[in-house]
Image: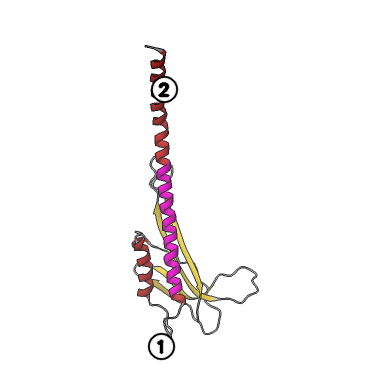
Amino acid sequence: MGPVRQFLADTAASQVAEAALVLPLVFMMLLGIYWFGRAFNIYATINHAAREAARAGAAQTCASCGNAHISTVQGTAIIDAILQASSVDPNQIILHDPTPQPCPIPGFTMERNVLGSNNNVLYYNYALLTPVGSPYPPVCGVRVTFQYPYQFWLPFTSLNRQQIILTADVQMKGEY
């Protein structure tokens, strides 16, 4: 066996060994990118759904209709349609019910609507959160808040089957 053949045989063997070490790491990195990307997509989707439900709740329906808030069915339909469009299961929504502060403006009473069987929470006439020591008077509006569980699937890592809770919490100034 000549020296050139010996060199080529050693190079091929080392390339196979290097590939055997590197390919699983590359595969795990690609899986991680996919699952973290999906988690970010779900987070953006639930925030979009909450934002659209809050926007619809903050706006009055119409002047000739009595300027009523959206109904529970309409709020649920908005959230469910957005979640289903992004292949997110609306049945997995978890109740997230922080203690709301009623609107301090006289004549406005706080309403709490539980949307659908999933207990999504939509507040009307909620005292919106303001920075501590703010010189401005309190503002009232709508708050939509719920949580969604997400589970990673990264085999051979500490993140395999790790569940995180994504929270959507949106508030909008009311149009009164």
Residue under numbered circle 1: 64
Magenta stretch holds residue 34: yes
Q: Position of residue 95 (x, y in %)?
A: 41, 64
- Taking the spot 49% from the left edge, 81% from the top edge, the residue there is 109
Q: Is residue 55 above or below residue 36?
A: below
- Within 10 Å of the Cα at label 2, are there few (<14), some (14-19), or many (20+) other Cα atoms? few
Q: Nearer the viewer, mark 1 or mark 2?
A: 2
Kind of residue at badge 1 = Ser
Query: In the rendered structure, which segment of residues is drawn in magenta?
Result: 29-56
Q: Is residue 58 above or below residue 1?
A: below
Q: Secondary structure at mark 2?
A: helix
Q: Position of residue 72 (x, y in %)?
A: 37, 75
Q: Position of residue 10 (x, y in %)?
A: 41, 20
- Quarter residue 146 falls in: bottom left
Q: Is residue 138 above or below residue 9?
A: below
User: Disc 1 or 2, which lies upstream in sequence?
Assistant: 2
Question: Distance between the Cα atoms at labels 1 and 2?
Answer: 82 Å
Q: Which label sits on residue 11?
A: 2
Magenta stretch holds residue 90: no
Please say whether residue 132 is visible from this viewpoint. Answer: yes
The quadrant of the rendering that contains the N terminus is top left
